[in-house]
Image (tube, rainbow, N blue to C red):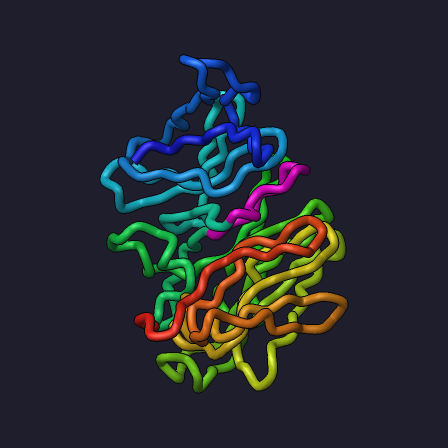
Amino acid sequence: VRVVVRAIAVLGIVGMGVEPRAFQSAGETAYRVTELRGLGGPDGRGNSVNDWGLVAGYSNLEGNTTRRAMLWFLGQKLPLGTFGGANSNVTWPGGVTNTGLVVGIAQTADPQTRSDGWSCRGFFPPGPDQSKYTCLGFVWEAGRMKRLPALRGDNSFAASANNRRHVVGWAETGAADSTCANPVDKGFLPVLWDLNRQRTVKLPLFGKDTAGAATAINDRDQVVGISGICDQSVGRHTAKHAVLWENGTVIDLGNLGADNWITPTSISPNGEFIVGFGNSPGADPN
């Protein structure tokens, strides 16, 4: 799979290594496409891009069973590391800011303590190390990669950041949650990491929900995400409600007629538009 970035003038998206101005070919407008070279494996992807062309995503290594978070800029590539484990990744559209801050997930060297393998497993390639180690959210800034803490649990997940150095995601607690697929697994909550104050802030859940995750944030500190039950720690019934957090309150955004996989992925700078995905009535909830 080739990783490419297209320059689309209508949307104002300019990819690294792609000339921003269109050129004419046979009377039609065309754009140049540049392949972003990876680490030798056949699978890679650019998941996020900022206004000056820094692209973040992942590339698999040879053998296609190990993955590294990647940055591409001006024809150069920079693989990011892990916290001693096998895999890392920048997973969501809000993974890189205009200040050059990058957030994602990385495995540690510690054995995974959850029976469901934590949320990271869906973003690492199938292989012996996919769910073997605990996984933490990371922030990469000024050439340094730092851990984002959990809530007394062992795992966390960073999805998005804004230009105010606020990062959102979700973090494991220290207590078991009976709504997990395996009731002895620990619960998890949506969180905001304030890098300026070195604080981890819990975001409220909707109604009587027990678990949730924050997936995107804009520069107004409006946050979107999901609220539901612990379930399997990867969407599904954890995403019973799509929600917006604003001024300390949580608002249900509605759904398409089903109450699973209802997941916002991005919020516009002015907070007026939110996009994502969700099941429709009768769809397979699994």
Whether residue 226 is visible: yes
- Is 110 drawn above or below residue 48 in the view shown? below
Viewport quadrant of the C terminus: bottom left
The percent position of residue 19, horizontal first and vertical second, equals 53, 19
What range is drawn magenta here? 93-105
Q: Is residue 238 left or right of residue 116?
A: right
Q: Of 141 and 16, which appears nearest the observer?
A: 16
- Is 92 drawn above or below residue 191 in the view shown? above
**Residue at x 31%, y 45% (from the top left corner):** 66
Q: Of 4 and 24, which appears nearest the observer?
A: 24
The percent position of residue 154, horizontal first and vertical second, equals 48, 67
**Residue at x 60%, y 83% (from the top left corner):** 207
Residue 103: say if magenta.
yes
The percent position of residue 139, horizontal first and vertical second, equals 58, 48
**Residue at x 46%, y 60% (from the top left corner):** 277
The part of the image, by quadrant, that contains residue 168 is: bottom right
Q: Is residue 171 left or right of residue 97?
A: left
